[in-house]
Amino acid sequence: MKNNRIAIVTGATGGIGFAVAKRLGQDGYTVVLNGINEEKGAKRIEELKAEGIDAEFCGFDVTNESLVTKNITEIGEKYGKIDVLINNAGGLGGRSRFEAMTTDFYRSVMALNLDSVFFASRAAIPFLKKGDHPTIINFTSNAAWNAGGPGAGIYGTSKAGVHTITRALAKDLAEYGIRVNAVSPGTIDTPFHQQIKSTKPEVFASWANNIMLGRLGQPDDVSGVVAFLASPDAGFITAETVQIGGGQALGI
């Protein structure tokens, strides 16, 4: 059943982002999928439309300030509002220890994970003000708390920034009834971990040993929580970060 709500999901052509877009579409949203691969985006839209989901692809680089502003403004003007913005796009960006880290690498990781949230949120706010139960949901990480593994220190730093900007946005936008929350997925079985999964499958499988619930997460474990946070059922929740890691953050 359509609910006439408009959701934008960045980084939505695969992994958790696509699972979130699909779940919101199943819940009746019109979903706008963002990504940088036009071919993959078109394929994802075909998949969603085959399920009767209203969806469109909007290709732009979330680190490009002018493109983010232009495209999100066009989406908002097309529909007259934005109800949900999911800032999912992000990534490790590679690994580098600080001593050898180039300034370009530092800036690229910060841009992908933190600048993108700022650019997209700023552009969406005027249209979220016109939305129904408007909300922003950001993606942070366990690395925001534990600073990441070897070579992932700047990734952890950027995700700590996402945790804080989530609360800052929530304070800033509360007067407009716009809620802002974040989710912090643990180890989720997605292409994000494809390299270690293919080269060291035994190591990848062993990660489940450090998770209380004894298994790796699946994209649907995340999409269900995001769908709840976007819904009116979460209408009194803002400035929160929800850990989705099967107890992984506490260790065992």
Image (tube, rainbow, N blue to C red):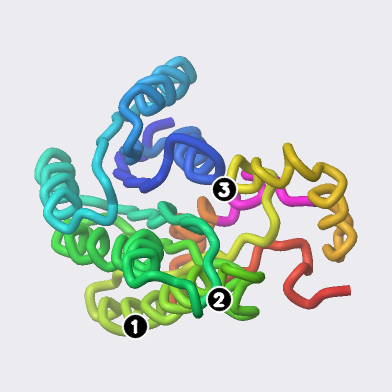
Check disc 3 and report the residue beneath it: 223
Type of amino acid at the residue the image marks with label 1: Ala
Q: Is residue 208 above or below residue 150?
A: above
Q: Earlier in the sequence, mark 2 or mark 1?
A: 2
Stretch in magenta: 216-225
Q: Secondary structure at mark 3?
A: helix
Residue appearing at x 25%, y 36% in the figure: 58
Residue 153, image x, y percentages: 55, 74
Q: Position of residue 75 (x, y in %)?
A: 17, 43
The answer to whether residue 251 is magenta is no
Q: Locate residue 201: give its quadrant.
A: top right
Check disc 1 and report the residue beneath it: 168
The residue pinned by badge 2 equals 144
Mark 2: amino acid: Ala
Q: Residue at x 24, y 80 (%)?
A: 175
Relative to 139, residue 15 above or below: above
Q: Residue at x 36, y 59 (%)?
A: 112
Asked whether residue 121 is in view, the answer is yes
Q: Is residue 240 visible?
A: no
Give the distance between the C-alpha atoms of the residues marked 2 and 3, in whole angstroms. Answer: 20 Å
Which quarter of the figure is the C terminus placed in?
bottom right
